Amino acid sequence: MADFQTHEHDVIVIGAGGAGLRAAIEASAAGVSVGLICKSLLGKAHTVMAEGGMAAALAHNDERDSWKTHFADTMRGGQYLNNWRMAELHAKEAPDRARELEAWGAVFDRTKDGRINQRNFGGHRYPRLAHVGDRTGLEMIRTLQDHSVHRGMTIYMETTVTQIIKDGPNGRVIGAVGYDRPTGTLHYWKAKAIVLATGGIGKAYKITSNSWEYSGDGHAMAYNAGADLMDMEFVQFHPTGMVWPPSVRGILVTEGVRGEGGVLRNSQGKRFMFDDIPDNYKPSTADSEEEGWRYVLGDKSARRPPELLTRDHVARCINREVKAGRGSPHGGVFLDIAWIKTKLANGEEHIKKKLPSMYHQFITLAGVDITKEPMEVGPTTHYVMGGVKVDGDTQMSTVPGLFAAGEVAAGLHGANRLGGNSLSDLIVFGKRAGEYAAKFAKENGPIKTDQAAVDAALKQTLAPLDRSGGENPYQVQYALQDMMQDLVGIVRREDEMAKALDGLAQLKARAAKASASASREYNPGWHTAIDLANLLTVSEAITRSAIERKESRGAQFREDFPNKSEEFGTFNHVVRKGPDGQMQVIRQPLTPLRDDLKQVIEENKNV
Amino acid sequence: MSHAPAKASSETRKQLFRVWRGDKTAGTFKDYTATVTPGMVVLDVIHQIQAEQANDLACRWNCKAGKCGSCSAEINGKPRLMCMTRMDELPTDMPVVVEPMKAFPLIKDLVTDVSWNYDVKKKIKPFKPRKPDAPDGTWRMDQADVDRVQEFRKCIECFLCQDVCHVLRDHHKHEEFIGPRFLVYTAALEMHPLDTEDRLADLRKSQGLGYCNITKCCTKVCPEHITITDNAIIPLKERVVDEYFDPVTKLFKMFKKKT
């Protein structure tokens, strides 16, 4: 059998972005031994790319804000498919988690009276996003990283976990196997509890803001371990990604641009977002450009400009403009922040101060000076609302000892996530997952090693290297990305998705034969072949769930079912591996909303 | 290098790439012909080579937008991020040479072992805030007072400044000198309005602040345009001098404190 190194921890955390780091810090604080395993170098995880900010009802910039409004905003944004307990805990605990970051050294932008400054963002009633220019994610991950290295945990960098090991089909988790990139050495981690914090699935699509790491590892490992996934049809297409030049297509343009007053125009120069405002947002949306600008300036009597409607809606409006022939030269629309110079004396300076990395990104990669000319933007695959189904309080999945937090977990965001709710999600539920994983490890005695299961998992990990003469894994991955983009993208149809299912079956057969040449040492061909299997699993989960949801809601837009259906608003889709190994999609009725929370939603309906 | 950057090309063209291939034991440059389309950056070309010609070509990358600092390499001899180096700013009449960073041990191809940096950071005394300003446990800070620290906190830990620093690159003083990255890190802590820790003794004794002779190479290569030498290192040097080598200032300070 293959050689491997064995490590032992009470809790292992897989993934070291915001959620993983926060979970590891919390578990360490509970006095258990923690191993933190990250696919890249520490501090490079996807959190680093988050730009706009972290939503927390601190009420610094508008004293009317409270957890209740934040909760209601989150539920409305998620079209009420959210796990309401998570939305409640998130809204209540985000302020404390944000303040905790400050106590650990984070340096947020300040209000005039010296407190944490908050900015406007889509779907949030009040200015709510604590931020640092447009590099909030970097601030978060660095703060957590620098804090964690003094907590005594063991960190495994550039190490990928490939499989969860359980003590029998219906048992608890007992460990995980994987490999490290530099040497290709195989590893087995014995663990009493596991926290998945592996992020998302963006690499299933061609145009995405996500990095190579986002291959749905946690989703696929949880599914293969028998855990339920939920809401997998809901993939967020961020309305504003770069569209030109081709090589940067998909790179994120922060919603912060619109929060600071950026407007969307079509090729006729029209602010098209005023044309289509959903009924449930009409009471809170400005009806003139003048009112929208007053909102940006902080006028409390003004309502939000329509550019700050939810991401699903803005993305669809952009798609509509492009399809109607009113797009920009490279197939997007125009996002203009330079226009605020007509309103602000120090406009150019203000843009550079509030959006420094956007300025830098556009001038370097596209040759566009955003203080002088508009950007070209279009939708890009950004985030998956779906993920591992978890208990709202503990973040434990349906597999004992397996926890999930952050993007890999489902529930908080329902059918559509509000911008800024991801960074707060990471620290609120990262902390909870760490706390309860430590508790589980303490309360659920010793574990044994299942040597046969470990051997089988290791063999599977090495399989692409053992095969020879098979297809190049990169080519299979590109074929998958093209197909998902074309057939299961922002606008969906039954016939196209049925075609995608056939395509997935063929791609699976190709992937099973894909081979990676050369050695185990830092061999990206091998890594790609392993990631590919995960991407195929999540792509199937997305496609099957999307076919079953015969309505349009949140991030899911069905051309053949363009309206919202009341019936489909009563359940989530759960994806589970059937006894025959086939993927099943099951309707899981929503848990009835608690009366006091019902009232909170009612109270906030018209603000 | 005397080559002026070529004019931005709007057409697809072929470009010769010369990429370092090898590991700890041996290595050599290998030539690849890449297809370059408008707007491409060096990392795009490396990915193309990886996908089409050499599946096992090792390189690090994540965000592809200059935010994570993973894809550091030396391009035509200059330490740079591959994702932020546009093809149309490089000369077309010679091969584009891509090599790993030199100040760290090679793992494979373009990937180096940067773990030393993580070990160094661990040894720097962590953030220690003063007591909260408000009864609810929070602090007050003016934007003007955090501007300076925010500049340092832009660092994406690409370690290009470490790579270019001759103290590390040529003189291999890794045991005695923490390098520009961690002087910036220390400056961010020392100048944090809430911090109460004292790191001056460490800077002077074990962290080798004195080795820096202000050649500003680090500032020049910083992709985040942090003015490393002027804003971080020189003020740290001044603080150490004030603390340890200037009796007049010391006396003056004592006098000031009393009044």
Image: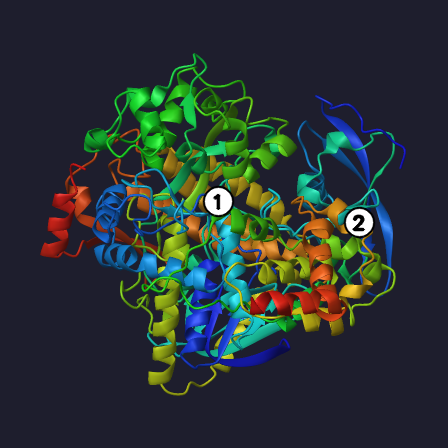
Residue A544 rendering spot, x and y as whole percentages: 34, 46
Badge 1: how crowded within 10 Å, few (<14), some, or many (20+)?
A: many
Residue shown at the point (68%, 54%) measured from the top left:
B232
Residue A136 location, x and y as percent?
A: 48, 49
Residue wearing tag 1: A51
Labels 2 and 1 in the same subunit? no
User: Helix or strand or loop: what does disc 2 sit on?
Assistant: helix
Location of residue A61 by image quarter:
top left
Q: Mark 2 lies on which chain?
A: B
Mark 2 = which residue?
Answer: B217
Relative to residue A210, is residue A140 depicted above or below?
below
Q: Residue at x 44, y 61 (%)?
A: A101
A442 or A257, which lies in front?
A257
Circle 2: is it few (<14), some (14-19), or many (20+) Cα within 10 Å?
some
**Image: B174 above or below A385:** below
Residue A24 drawn above or below residue A512: below
Residue at screen point 49% across, 34% down? A241
Cα distance in 3D space between marks 2 and 1: 29 Å
Q: Is residue A582 visible?
A: yes
Please state if A507 lies on the left or on the right of A438 as rendered: right
Which of pointers 2 and 1 indicates the residue nearer the eye?
A: 2
